[in-house]
Amino acid sequence: MELSKAKIIVTGGASGLGAATAAHLLERSAHVTILDRDPIGAEIAASIGARFEQTDVTSEASAARAIKAAAQAMGGLTTAINCAGIATAERTLGRNGPHGLDSFRRTIDINLIGSFNISRLSAEIMSLNDDQEERGVIINTASVAAFDGQKGQAAYAASKGGIAALSLPMARDLATMGIRAMAIAPGIFRTPMLESLGQEVMDGLAKDVTFPKRLGDPIEYARLAAFIIESPYLNGTTIRLDGALRMP
């Protein structure tokens, strides 16, 4: 799929990986609409020349409305990139008792169910595209926590493990319609959420990366997303983007 012809929605596009991806794809001449719950996304979108739809990815009605509006404005939909997500730090059993069920459910709801919600609704619109060779591609965001989750990551790892597990069955489900499904599993990336922890913490995290010994740059995620869009033989799998990091 040529990026200049791509019509893309990016969830969580108001910050971090999503914002970097939206900006990079626009630079590559794609049409991009940012979907985000935070209304500041409108300012981010305007600053880079994208469209914006305020969206709750966990809501069927909100997601359906946003995707339909984006497709109408862009003249179709060929790509959905799911970057919206949250991180939860809570042990299965801690000093204050068992892991909160509400916080576990919220993490699964946003990270896993939200991504599936956007994917399924986007696939319906992509299936109407005229191109008989490839009608669309879906890129979900997993995490290295899906494979080596650390203490306090039960909810987060479970949600991201679900994303990784989705790739193959979703690709098989959508194959007859010419739609691919992929996932990217980032390692430790320098995002606003991580920067809020301070430089000392970030330096400590970077020490565990094999090479290059640094945090990932969101542009590296964006470039991989662009490569996946342009590579029709990439389908049904999860790519680790982590500098060979294996979480201790």
Image (cartoon, rainbow, N blue to C red):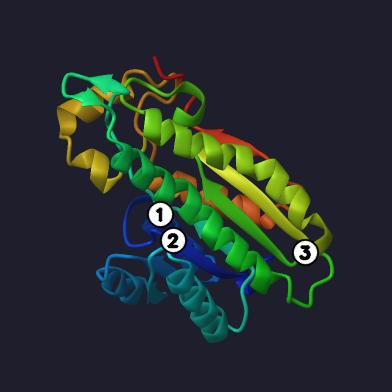
Q: Position of residue 117 (x, y in %)?
A: 53, 59
The disc label shown at residue 11, or none: 2
- Residue at 30 percent of width and 45 percent of height: 191
Q: Quadrant of residue 47?
A: bottom left
- Answer above or below: position of 17 versus 34: above
Q: Are marks 2 and 3 in contact (CB under 8 Å)?
A: no
Q: Nearer the viewer, mark 1 or mark 3?
A: 1
- Tag 3: amino acid: Glu
- Tag 1: amino acid: Ala
**Observer able to see residue 38:** yes
Q: Which residue is mark 3?
A: 134
Q: Is residue 179 left or right of residue 26?
A: right
Q: Are marks 1 and 2 in contact (CB under 8 Å)?
A: yes
Q: Which residue is mark 1?
A: 84
Q: Position of residue 50 (x, y in %)?
A: 42, 75
Q: Is residue 240 left or right of residue 170?
A: left
**Observer able to see residue 143:** no
Cα distance between the residues tagged 1 and 2: 5 Å
Label 1 vs 2, first from the N-terminus = 2
In the displayed image of the protein, which residue is found farthest to the top? Answer: 248
